[in-house]
Image (spheres, rainbow, N blue to C red):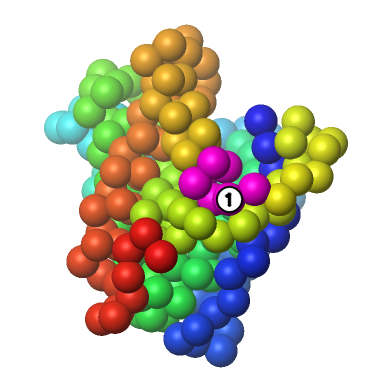
Amino acid sequence: MFVPLHDDNALEQIPRPYVNWALVALSVAVHALVALVPSGDVGAASAALGIVPSAVQGPEPLQAGQGIVPPAGTLVTYAFLHGSWMHLLGNMLFLWVFGDNIEDAVGHGRYLLFFVLCAAGAGLFHVAMHPGSGTPLIGASGAVAGVVGAYLLLHPRVKVWVLVLKRLPMRLTAAWVLGFWVLLQLCSAFIDTGNRISWWAHVGGIVVGMVLIVFMRRRGVPLLD
């Protein structure tokens, strides 16, 4: 696998990606807050704010700790909870490297809407593929996958610095780096059915992000730049 470090893609429409910074900061703050409470409360936070497919699909008896947020609301709140610092770091690194250019392409307000819709769309994909599950889904991976999908559609030729196998620094085009990442999510969704990772949420996020960027980008922002 690879770790993204930096892209050679300067902002053109906005001076600073304030919304992207705010999303990263909020995610870190929420995880830090949850990490400070006893371990039992961490599980309760996941049950209350994570997506529980059986609850989203219809009237199901709520377990203790659930019901703080309506099931539809968890399609957004789940994206700001993470299971560990490594889980958080991986998502935030992708968001930091690629999210600023999506915000540049759509504008501040629409980028916030874009992120929320990608999170919700990814969550619904997960619900559709695991309809009876009572296990909460948490993490920004689906929303970040939407950012990656949009970036791939906008800037496939941009050079990206990555650590291949977490050790070897390389400068590759986004088409190779992100294209491989997207292919990995698709293959994993069909093959790695027993893993705790919700690959279908990733796939859903990619699809939603690619569709949304076509309609939400500013006038004059080309695809496949």
Which residue is most to the bottom?
15
Judge by depth and name the residue closer to the eye, 10 or 64. Answer: 10
Asked if residue 177 is among those painted magenta in the image, a careful observer would answer yes
Secondary structure under tag 1 reads: strand
| Residue at 75% over, 45% down | 170
How crowded is the residue under tag 1: few (<14 C-alpha within 10 Å), some, or many (20+)? some
- Magenta residues span 172-178
Residue 74 seen in this snapshot: no
94 vs 122, left or right, is: right
> Where's residue 218, x and y in %?
30, 79
> Would you identify the image quadrant in which residue 223 lies?
bottom left
Percent position (x, y) of residue 79? 46, 49
Q: Which residue is mark 1?
A: 173
Q: Residue at x 51, y 57 (%)?
A: 157
205 left or right of 195 in image: left
Confirm whether residue 5 shows in the render.
yes
Extreme residue in the left direction? 58
